[in-house]
Image (tube, rainbow, N blue to C red):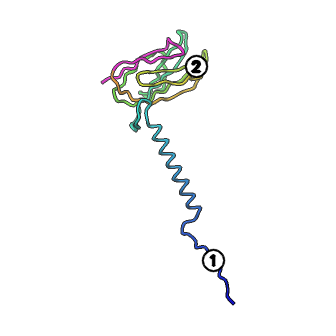
């Protein structure tokens, strides 16, 4: 009588669960790298810029004088809105990475707001009340350039890129 031996499958030193776990980890890392890479490319550039950005806060407001922009500076560590810096002139050194934060604070009329700087390809979407948008760009051209609103033409200012 011949006994049949059952074929035992040889067990792999790496289990299916380990392979799945490693595959998930690789996918997450790849996704994270892709996210960081794509969000590090300024709007007017094709290569990532990992240098620290200079933050500029522009508030779109409405007051007794009408629609205007106001700059809120955090350079001194204080977040106080003066209301006296209407349609401000912004000065930045050439080559600076700018994180432009545009915030619609028009609580009086609730109108949509926007901001555009054609020279640097900066165009926000139409922002609803208390909505914000941040756009990163490199101030790579010397000169004085206008910024403006397409919704409220009276809202305008300039950004000066110094050498």
Asked if 8 appears above or below 75 in the picture, the reply is below
Q: Which one is in front, 94 or 12?
A: 12
Secondary element type, mark 1: loop
Q: How many marks?
A: 2
Q: Is residue 120 magenta?
A: no
- Residue at 45% x, 41% y: name it: 37
Residue extending farthest to the front is 1
Q: Which residue is mark 2?
A: 112
Q: Nearer the viewer, residue 87 or 124?
A: 124
Residue at x 33%, y 27% (from the top left corner): 94
**Does 117 appear above or below 67?**
below
Q: State if disc 2 and disc 1 touch (CB < 8 Å).
A: no
* Residue 152 magenta: yes
Q: Please, what secondary structure does the residue beneath circle 2 have?
A: loop
- Residue that appears at 42% across and 17% down: 146
Q: Judge left or right: residue 128 versus residue 149.
A: right
For the record, the magenta segment spans 143-163
Q: Residues within 10 Å of mark 1 (few under 14, many from 20)?
A: few
Q: Position of residue 132 (x, y in %)?
A: 54, 27
Residue furthest bottom in the image: 1
Q: Which residue is mark 1?
A: 7
Position of the N terminus by quadrant: bottom right
Whole-percent x and y of residue 115?
Answer: 49, 21
Quadrant of the frame with the C terminus = top left
- Out of 9 and 71, give the one closest to the viewer: 9
Looking at the picture, does residue 145 appear above or below residue 140?
A: above
Determine the CA span between mark 1 and mark 2: 73 Å
Return the x and y of residue 24 as percentages of the image width and height: 55, 53
Residue closer to the observer: 95 or 30 = 30
């Amino acid at each position: 009588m011949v006994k049949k031996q059952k074929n035992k499958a040889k067990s792999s030193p790496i289990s299916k669960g380990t392979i799945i776990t490693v595959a998930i980890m690789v996918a997450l890392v790849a996704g994270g790298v892709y996210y960081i890479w794509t969000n590090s490319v300024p709007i007017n550039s094709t290569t990532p810029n990992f240098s620290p950005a200079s933050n500029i806060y522009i508030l779109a407001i409405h007051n007794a004088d009408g629609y205007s922009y106001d700059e809120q500076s955090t350079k001194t560590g204080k977040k106080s809105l003066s209301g006296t810096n209407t349609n401000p002139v912004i000065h930045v050194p050439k080559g600076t990475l700018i994180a432009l934060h545009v915030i619609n604070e028009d609580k009086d009329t609730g109108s949509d707001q926007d901001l555009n700087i054609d020279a640097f390809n900066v165009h926000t979407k139409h922002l609803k009340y208390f909505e914000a948008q941040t756009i990163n760009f490199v101030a790579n051209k010397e000169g004085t350039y206008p910024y403006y609103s397409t919704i409220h033409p009276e809202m305008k200012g300039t950004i000066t890129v110094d050498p």
